[in-house]
């Protein structure tokens, strides 16, 4: 609770807010909130100060892998939740509540890996792994849905954002989670029609449906991600993967925000690309039998932002530490912790 800005104020009030070890003296509280960290301080320096402070966060899960074999669907982006500066969360939902913390609290962070792209005729892309931030409450995002493949596994999977449907299928695409991401794109095709795969859903927009151009189709583009300025610069993340094409068309483009490109048809003979690491972007869908291996959705990321005057420097997991004006930003690309 913030100390009053006017009226009587004594050492007992300061101890009640900031704690400490008896016997107490005012010098025990150098650097508390806005109190100077050196030189002369007085009771008056503590008016309006508080032991509580805010930590903002951006939590993105791993992107889904693209579908395998004929005109695979693009992988969906990892789920996206944000508290910073009233920026939207995934599926253009309301910004979440900032954490209010005190010194000595420990935050644990788990970063989701990207899902793998399907490697065979009927192998869907796998879902990405969840990312989890545990602080005053638990903020969890779902891994992106894997893209559909040929035959029995043609529908994209549900996830943070949904995977795109294979060009084989007329069924709907994978669904995105409420408050995290959009649905994947459908194909509207039937077996042998040669239509491209649907695009994976993104945090900021649905995956596109494949264009039905006779006799050949093109892979659909992945859905757009979302931009956040939590690091001080606006960066798009969590774009969906592009759908693959079967014949001489083109693969779909990855959604803005790290989505991988879908494989092009036989005339280009190209493999899909992975979602970009630490964006949660979905992987691109495959085409035909080209022996592509190793593609995946992009891994997730968790970013914390707090006043530099409150930064403790106590971390595990080797986050990248940067500053933006009065603020310190911790970017975790691997699991770890921060103690306030």
Image (tube, rainbow, N blue to C red):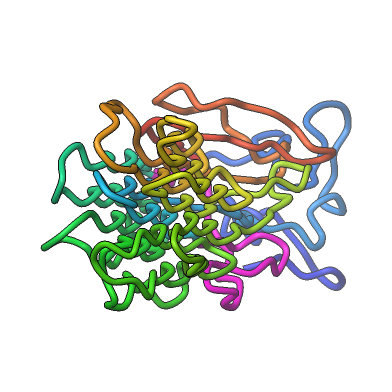
Residue 114, horizontal then vertical, whole percent:
34, 40
Residue 196, horizontal then vertical, whole percent:
41, 58
The residue under the point 49% across, 59% down is: 80
Residue 61, horizontal then vertical, whole percent:
39, 50
The residue under the point 41% across, 77% down is: 178
Q: Quadrant of residue 270?
A: top left
Say if residue 138 shows up in the picture.
Answer: no
The front one of 273 and 228 is: 273
The front one of 120 and 175 is: 120
* The stretch drawn in magenta includes residue 246: no
Count up the numbered dots.
Answer: 0
The front one of 185 and 191 is: 191
257 vs 230, left or right, is: left
Q: Is residue 7 above or below residue 148?
A: below
Q: Residue furthest top?
A: 318
Q: Residue furthest front?
A: 215
Residue 133, horizontal then vertical, whole percent:
39, 51
Say if residue 129 shows up in the picture.
Answer: yes
What residue span does the magenta drawing correspond to?
81-107
The front one of 151 and 145 is: 151
Q: Quadrant of the N terminus?
A: bottom right
The residue under the point 47% across, 34% down is: 267
The residue under the point 42% across, 62% down is: 198
* The stretch drawn in magenta includes residue 106: yes
Q: Is residue 173 above or below residue 116?
A: below
């Amino acid at each position: 609770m913030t100390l009053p800005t006017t009226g009587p104020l004594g050492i007992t009030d300061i101890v009640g807010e900031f704690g400490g070890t008896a016997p107490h003296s005012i010098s025990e509280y150098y650097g508390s909130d806005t109190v100077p960290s050196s030189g002369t301080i007085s009771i008056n320096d503590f008016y309006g100060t508080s032991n509580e402070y805010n930590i903002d966060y951006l939590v993105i899960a791993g992107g889904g892998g693209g579908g395998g074999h004929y005109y695979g669907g693009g992988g969906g982006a990892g789920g996206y939740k944000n508290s910073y500066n009233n920026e939207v969360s995934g599926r253009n939902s309301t910004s979440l509540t900032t954490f209010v913390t005190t010194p000595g609290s420990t935050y644990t962070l788990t970063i989701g890996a990207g899902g793998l792209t399907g490697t065979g005729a009927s192998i869907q892309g796998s879902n990405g792994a969840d990312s989890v931030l545990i602080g005053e409450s638990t903020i969890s995002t779902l891994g992106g849905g894997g893209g559909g493949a040929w035959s029995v596994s043609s529908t994209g999977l549900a996830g943070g954002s949904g995977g795109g449907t294979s060009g084989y299928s007329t069924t709907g695409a994978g669904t995105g989670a409420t408050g995290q991401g959009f649905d994947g794109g459908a194909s509207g095709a039937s077996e042998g029609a040669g239509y491209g795969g649907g695009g994976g859903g993104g945090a900021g927009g649905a995956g596109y449906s494949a264009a039905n151009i006779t006799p050949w189709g093109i892979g659909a583009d992945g859905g757009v991600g979302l931009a956040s300025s939590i690091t001080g610069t606006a960066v798009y993340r969590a774009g969906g993967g592009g759908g693959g094409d079967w014949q001489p068309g083109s693969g779909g483009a990855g959604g803005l925000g790290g989505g991988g490109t879908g494989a092009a048809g036989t005339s280009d003979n190209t493999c899909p690309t992975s979602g970009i690491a630490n964006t949660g972007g979905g992987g691109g869908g495959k085409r035909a039998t080209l022996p592509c291996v190793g593609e995946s959705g992009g891994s997730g990321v968790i970013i914390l932002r707090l006043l530099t005057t409150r930064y403790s420097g106590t971390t595990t997991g080797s986050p990248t530490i940067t500053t933006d004006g009065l603020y310190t930003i911790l970017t975790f690309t691997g699991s770890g912790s921060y103690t306030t």
